Every structure is written in structure tokens, then in C-alpha cells.
Amino acid sequence: MTTKADFNAEEWSQVAEGPPLAGLIVITAQRGGTLRESMQMAKYWVAEREQHEGGELLDALLAERPEVDPKQFQSAEALRSEGLEKVRAAVALLESKATPEEVEAYKRFTLGLAQRVAEAHKSGGVLGVGGEQVSAAESAALSEIAETLGLEPPTTTQEAS
């Protein structure tokens, strides 16, 4: 079992920053819903902390408050490209230190967080009727995150009622 103690402070920061970066990438993919999406990211984090079983590495990650400074990026495009690179580097670091099961759990948690954020705010429609649960831009961001993690993109629901 891999623990937080297996990482120096800089490495742990890199690992801890990956999931919230994935959430931010989705948040900035489409205008609107930022507050709702941010709240959904926090709710998902708390829910996973309460439901997660086993795996000291993910337990340690979930025990901390997710933090990432979006101001470190010059633009949404910079966040997307540099953020994906940071997520990729975090996974590579984990692959060098953690078990394959722990790496897989981290990847699934990261993608699950991004998907929950994408589903937090309907795009389009009028007064909450119609629109898309996940916009095309958010879906594209999810696909890029999944590709970065080496996972299949999640299936997203598109509403048009």
C-alpha cells in the first residue's frame, strides 16, 4: 500500500492537484454555471471521502481539501493544455510509486469528479426546460481528460426536451 509518506511535499502537491484541475478544465470549457459546478465538485469530494473504502493513497487525498489556484494560468486555453499536462504528470508519478490498483482508483476518481462537474449545470434551454445536461464543450473536455488518464470517456446524457 502506498501512503502520503511515500511522496515528498512537492510530489504530493502534484498528485493532490490533479483531480481539482480536471474539474476546473470542465468548469472553464463552457460559460455559465461556475458556482453550481464548483459546489458540485466539493460535494463529490465529500461524498467520495464518506463512501470510499480501502486504499490509503486515495484516503489521504480525500482527507485534504481540494486546492488549485486557477490564477496560475493565463487563460482557459492555458488551463486546459497546462492542466492536462499536470494531470498526466501526476499519473506518471503515481505509476512510478503506487500500485496499479491505486493508480486506477485515482484515475477513476479524477474522471468521476470531472463528469460530476460537467453534469452540474444544464446548458441552453429556457427557464430550465430543454438544453443539454452536458454541453459539447464539456463533453470534449471530458474526452480529453479521459484520454489523458488512459480511460474511456464517460457516457453523457444529452437532453433536448
Image: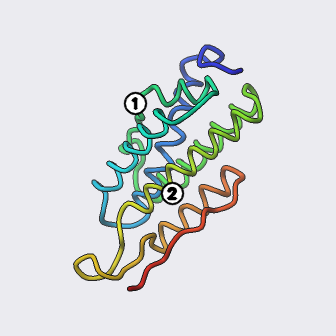
Q: Is residue 57 left or right of residue 123?
A: right
Q: Amino acid at mark 2?
A: Gln
- Disc number for residue 65: 1
Q: Is residue 86 above or below residue 141?
A: above
Expressed as whole percent of the image width and height from the top left, the position of residue 18 reads 54, 40
Q: Which image quarter: residue 36?
A: bottom left
Residue designated by label 2: 115
Quarter assignment of residue 15:
top right
* Horizontal arrangement in the rendering, residue 46 relative to residue 102 (left or right): left
| Mark 1 residue type | Arg
Q: Position of residue 154 (x, y in %)?
A: 60, 62
User: Where's residue 29, x and y in %?
Assistant: 44, 63
**Figure quadrant of the C terminus:** bottom left
Image coordinates of residue 90 in percent, x first then y, are: 63, 36
Q: CA distance from mark 2 to mark 1?
A: 19 Å
- Asked if residue 70 lies left or right of residue 143, the reply is left
Q: Quadrant of the N terminus?
A: top right
Q: Nearer the viewer, residue 72 or 155?
A: 155
Please, is residue 32 above or below residue 34 in the view? below
